[in-house]
Amino acid sequence: MTEPTADVPNAPEPAERAATEPTTAAPGVESAAASADAPAGRRADETDSGPAPTIIVLTEEALKPVDVDKILGLHEDDAPTYRVLVPADTERNLLSSFLNHLSLFEMREALESLRPVDRSEAHTDADAALSTTLAEFGGHDVVATGEITADDPMPTLVEEVARLGALEVVVVTEPHAVEDTFHTDWASRAREALGVPVLHMYAGDWRLG
């Protein structure tokens, strides 16, 4: 005599189990559903980027439209802010200025460079150069601030790069035969002192120093 057997519910087929049981993603691997909800090109757990990067511009004179256009074109996709530094040239090296102008056959400028520097006039010129430069940046609807530095801008430049976490430094000058030849120009000194890229541009020109 056989014993009666208890009714056992039909177990789901293997394919049915796979469809009904929850799956656990391996550590470090996103599920397809999570990835589908994320915008294209971004991970699901990716957050918005932080504040815009800062480019520091060190210039010895008012920037021309061509200068500003070139600087803005360097990082169009990054939408950076700009910090402009203009030294007050109150202690110009007369001999160096004379030789620089002479090497460029600028005889009138060479003779004028031998005149003693008027400190008040130097500050006024620096202030005008800063205002003009900030206005040029403002015309492109970008954020730009600035300040006048001491004759030697390196201490302020180093401080500003550290304070702002600058992405790059752009140095804009006229060609200086003596400084450029012996690598004592601002760009060369900045490259030695800073840990960020330093680009040297000649004012009103598309050439790089």
Image (cartoon, rainbow, N blue to C red):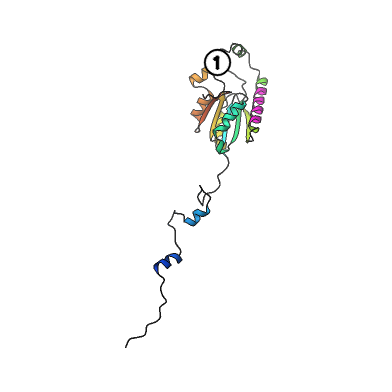
Res. 154 in view: no
Front residue of 188/142: it is 142
Q: Residue at x 56, y 32 (%)?
A: 73
Which residue does the numbered mark 1 point to in the structure image?
100
Q: Answer above or below: position of 57 versus 96.
A: below
The amino acid type, in three-letter code, at marker 1 is: Asn
The x and y percentages for residue 84 are: 61, 30
Q: Quadrant of residue 5?
A: bottom left
- Residue 125 located within the stretch drawn in magenta: yes
What element does badge 1 sit on?
Answer: helix
Mainly helix, strand or loop, the magenta region? helix
Res. 161 in view: yes
Q: Answer above or below: position of 164 versus 101.
A: below
Start-end of magenta stretch:
123-136
**Total marks drawn?**
1
Front residue of 2/145: it is 2
- Residue 171 located within the stretch drawn in magenta: no
The x and y percentages for residue 41 are: 50, 47
Q: Quadrant of residue 58?
A: top right
